[in-house]
Image (cartoon, helix red, strand yellow):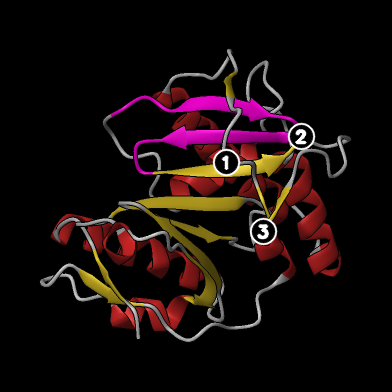
Amino acid sequence: MTVLHLADEGEAADLAAFLSRLLHYDRGAAVRLQAAGTALAVFGRPPSFEVLAIRAVRLAKPYENGLDVTLDVTVSAGELLESVDESAATALVPEAVTGPPWAGVLPPRGGWQPVPGLPAPDALRAMVGVGIAEFRSRTEELAPERRTRAELDRIGREIWSRAVGDTHLPVRAVHAAQSLGFLRGGGEPALLSCGAWLRLRTPYGSIAVRRAGLGALDVSIR
């Protein structure tokens, strides 16, 4: 079984926290791992948000000692979490699983360009708070016979599909970033675009989403 040597205990703890949050939303979550050089990218898709979450993890040494070898595998998030040893700063790569459809279509590796108009971090967090409060208020006002899953989903889609400021980024991407621990204090988030994709990047991770109406342009099938 392949052993990943993480840069330090902090990287191990952050990886474990990310996996725990994914599992909170999907107990059977899978993650796609890609490692090359001293970087490990962990991709997940929390179903409640319909976005792709990306956590970059620093490795203590080049993967496979710098040989012309890369890691690219989809595994159980739960099994990976169980293998993380924070004190030793290591993790074991579990056996591969049959990946969900999203795992075969990832954002492009490069070509990202900055997009203006992203509000300040405090404003982003406030935006999520307003959305949560509105959802709670509107659902509580529903008559019991109208409080169906379909109606709750409709209200949720209406709120979380709204654009952030003057950008095309949906508020659900910001909600996902906060829920997954990516909007912590320290470091400014940035909004980037590449083809059909938008990416909310923070020092703690990124949220990628495909812009509506642009189809499957510029996807990377790997």
Neighbour tally class for label 1: few under 14, some 14-19, many 20 plus, Cα within 10 Å: few
Residue for badge 1:
109
Residue under the image location 54 percent in, 38 percent down = 174
Picture residue at 34% right of the left edge, 36% below the top: 203
Specify the quadrant of the image occupied by residue 214.
top right
Looking at the rendered structure, the secondary structure element under dot 3 is loop
User: Residue at label 2?
Assistant: 196
Residue 29, above or below 33: below
Q: Position of residue 4 (x, y in %)?
A: 29, 70
> Which image quadrant: the N terminus?
bottom left
Q: Earlier in the sequence, mark 3 or mark 2?
A: 2
Q: Residue 67, how many percent across, how many down? A: 35, 61
Residue at position x 60%, y 60% from top? 45
Front: mark 3 or 2: 3
Drawn side of residue 45 relative to residue 148, left or right? left
- Indicate which label's residue lies in the foreground, 1 or 2: 1
Cα distance in 3D space between marks 3 and 2: 17 Å
Q: What numbered label is drawn on residue 222?
A: 3
Bounds of the magenta span? 187-204
Q: Is residue 190 left or right of residue 20?
A: right
Which circle's residue, 3 or 1, is located before the other in the chain? 1
Q: Establish if 49 lies above or below 72.
A: above
Q: Main secondary structure of the magenta part?
A: strand
Give the residue type at disc 2: Ala
In the rendering, at what x and y percent does residue 111 appear?
Answer: 61, 28
Quadrant assignment for the C terminus: bottom right
